[in-house]
Amino acid sequence: MVDLAASATGDLQLRNIRKEFGDFVAVDDLNLTIPKGSFFALLGPSGCGKTTTLRMIAGLEEPTSGTIAVGDTDITYSKPYRRPVNTVFQNYALFPHLTIFENVAFGLRRRGIKDVKEAVEKVLALVELGHLKDRKPGQLSGGQQQRIAVARAIVNRPALLLLDEPLGALDLKLRRQMQIELKWIQTEVGITFVHVTHDQEEAMTMADTIAVMNKGRIEQMGSPVDLYENPETVFVANFLGQSNLIKATVGTNSGAETSVDVQGARIILPTSRNRSAKSSVLVGIRPEKINIHAAGTSTGKNALHDGVVTDISFVGVSTQYQVEMPWKQELMVFEQNDGGAANIRKGDRVTLSWEPNFTFALDSED
Amino acid sequence: MSRWFSRNLIRIYAALALIYLFIPVGYTMAFSFNDAGKRNINWQGFTLDNWKNPCGAPDICVALGNSLKIGFLSTFIATILGTMIAFALGRYKFRGRSATNLLIFLPMATPEIVMGASLLAMFVNMNVNTGFWTTVIAHIMFCISFVVVTVKARVASLDPKLEEAARDLYANEYETFRRVTFPLVLPGIAAAALLAFSLSFDDFIITNFNSGTITTFPKFIWISSIRGVPAQANVIGTAMFLIALTIVIAGQVVGNAKAKKRR
């Protein structure tokens, strides 16, 4: 088949993509380059525009403006069946009237390939479900259907595989297993995976690069470690893991270090980790980075005094403390249960301390 | 005794209800074996003559043939038209959709006698001679609504994601319809066609107004009931019933066998 769009390969490029539904702007000036062969995640809460973005890449929606290209080939307005893109749908969308074999062979047959047996059996072996090829989708478990949905897409060797919340319908244990399996399949077949999810843990487990979306825009993009350790916005700081965000006023800047005033206490952070240009900022610190001590015995460089423990919950790997500060803000502290835990009880007065390197500062959202 | 009674109350009730439903059918069947002569009202003795010669009564098989022809033709046309309307209503948003939805229900709600009389008035005004084709037109008209309602339910239950998946898997619009949409809606279309046929075959009121000199099976029975319905009518009625029953049972058996094989 001499079809330029269908055989395009290369990086996926979204340029100035905008999508409106009536008055509602679902996606707003989105720019994104997804390198060939990567495992990319679009992460965000429901309604953030991530599924709309995926549907535009698949060709199931047309952008209001902007361009979508694979390599040098513009596919913005190509029909979905003329794109080198296949999708694993949220509820799998397996054809209920066809056998598993025919489901997987569907794409190959539509492209006019006569001898599909070998390719189909190979991909069914890859997902370890060859023995179910004569069944109908309704007779398979959720996890099996999920794998067939993946097989049905990757058998076509698309340049791009889109996954729309593919693990949402599975229970936790199966979801973990499928995360590992999907990651393995991606490495095995070398196709670019674009994975849409609202589950930050899922995105962090699987993806090389994550783009965090909010209200139709990309808030921040980077590796899981980068996003977690160096959040650039309040939204990212709260959406990936938990953060303690405290109002502060910027004080002196001595080049490498910046000091801020937090309710009278002097807190130091690397200047490179101050993402705000304003004088009033939110100082952030992850709960697991904080050490908790009985009042007055602090050792760290950054310390906040006179907290009162209001709640303690033991969650196995760690103990989570809720500490009320004098300015009535509750802070979270996670201490690992490695035997060195301080003997702290509910109602105790405590001091919280941490290393300056872990501190970051953000623009307050309002 | 009373414990036995309360424990089996539901069974007794079910048995009585079924007997109530099937007495007329049983009566029809039994009297197809009546050695009746002209008036098939009193039991005159058992015979197989009626079954050996179902066309024995004058003109009965002409009427039956007319009914089958009208039934198949109006079913065929009503199913095609109704299915297209059902897809339009179930799939697309357009101006006047909700009005169309409402109007489709009207023929079902209108009393048949009124509709039959109005149709006749219309044909007379247009100087059309009533007969075979006016009957077909009338039957298509009242069958369409039922087809639309039946098929629309099936279209509505079809997950649009399946069609998106087909398009995603290199099927163009035509292939998507042929390979995914149509096979999945087909059971609804088949049910609609069966319903349309039975409505057409059964119809007397509208047919009586608009069929002119053409005699259908229901019309034949009504006319002959003045002088006495021949036992052959019971034979044909019983045969229709048994054919329908066989089709239903065969469908169940085949379905069960398929389900068993898959396991």
Image: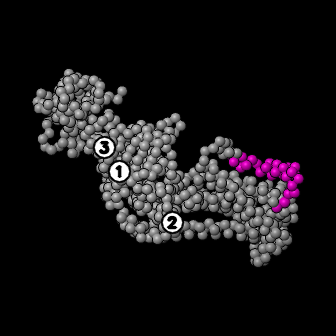
* x, y percent for residue B212: 86, 59
Quarter location, residue B178: bottom right
Quarter location, residue A135: bottom left
The mark that comes first in sequence, 3 or 1, is 1
For the point 47% across and 50% down, which residue is it?
A75
Mark number for residue A112? 2
In the image, taking residue A250 as reference, residue B158 lies left or right, namely right
Q: Nearer the viewer, residue B30 or A301?
A: A301
Q: How is the image coloured?
A: one colour
Q: Which residues are magenta?
A: B104-132
For the point 51% across and 49% down, which residue is it?
A77
Identify the amino acid type marked 2: Gly
In the image, taking residue A64 as reference, residue A300 lies left or right, namely left
- Examine the rendering and report whether any part of residue A263 can be seen: yes
Mark 3 vs mark 1: give the one in front.
Answer: 1
* x, y percent for residue A225: 26, 44
Q: Magenta span has B128? A: yes
In the image, taking residue A158 as reference, residue B81 lies left or right, namely right
Mark 1 lies on a secondary structure that is loop
Q: Which residue is mark 1?
A: A35
Q: Which residue is mark 3?
A: A222
